[in-house]
Image: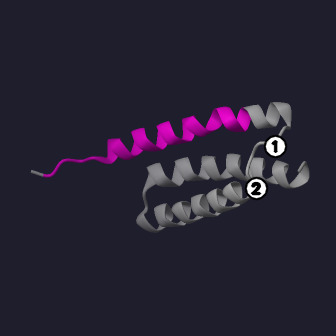
Amino acid sequence: MDIDLTWTGYVAATLTTLAFVPQAVKTLRTRDTRSISLYMYVVFTVGIGFWLLYGIALHSWPMIVSNTVTLGLAGMILAMKLRWR
């Protein structure tokens, strides 16, 4: 019996993306990036980019949508970190 677990991808994508939103909102509001690790955000942002490419290769909409949103948020925070360090 094959079970379609696509919904688990949507739930995981939604939760991990939503978990990232408070940090992005706080950083955008306060413009305070002193406590954010530059190295971590560089590695994280590149990693999200690769997850996005992997999702595109698999035609996995949960991965594509969530990683597109997260890449945008992480990219904004990384840009602010580089600008306001």
User: Which residue lies under the disc numbered 1?
Assistant: 33
Q: Is residue 68 left or right of residue 62?
A: right
In this view, 13 is above or below 53: above
Query: Is residue 37 a member of the stretch shown in magenta?
Result: no
Q: Is residue 25 left or right of residue 19?
A: right
Q: Residues within 10 Å of mark 1 (few under 14, many from 20)?
A: some
Query: Is residue 19 a member of the stretch shown in magenta?
Result: yes
In this view, 11 is above or below 45: above
Residue at image position (48%, 66%) is 54
**In the rendered structure, which amino acid carries the disc numbered 1?**
Thr
Q: Tag 1, which secondary structure?
A: loop
- Magenta stretch mostly in which secondary structure? helix
Residue at image position (38%, 46%) is 9
The circle on residue 38 is 2
State the residue in front, 20 or 72: 20
The residue range painted magenta reads 2-25
Q: Position of residue 75 (x, y in %)?
A: 73, 53
Mark closest to the chain's N terminus, 1 or 2 = 1
Residue at image position (49%, 38%) is 14
**In the rendered structure, which amino acid carries the disc numbered 2?**
Leu
Residue at image position (66%, 32%) is 22
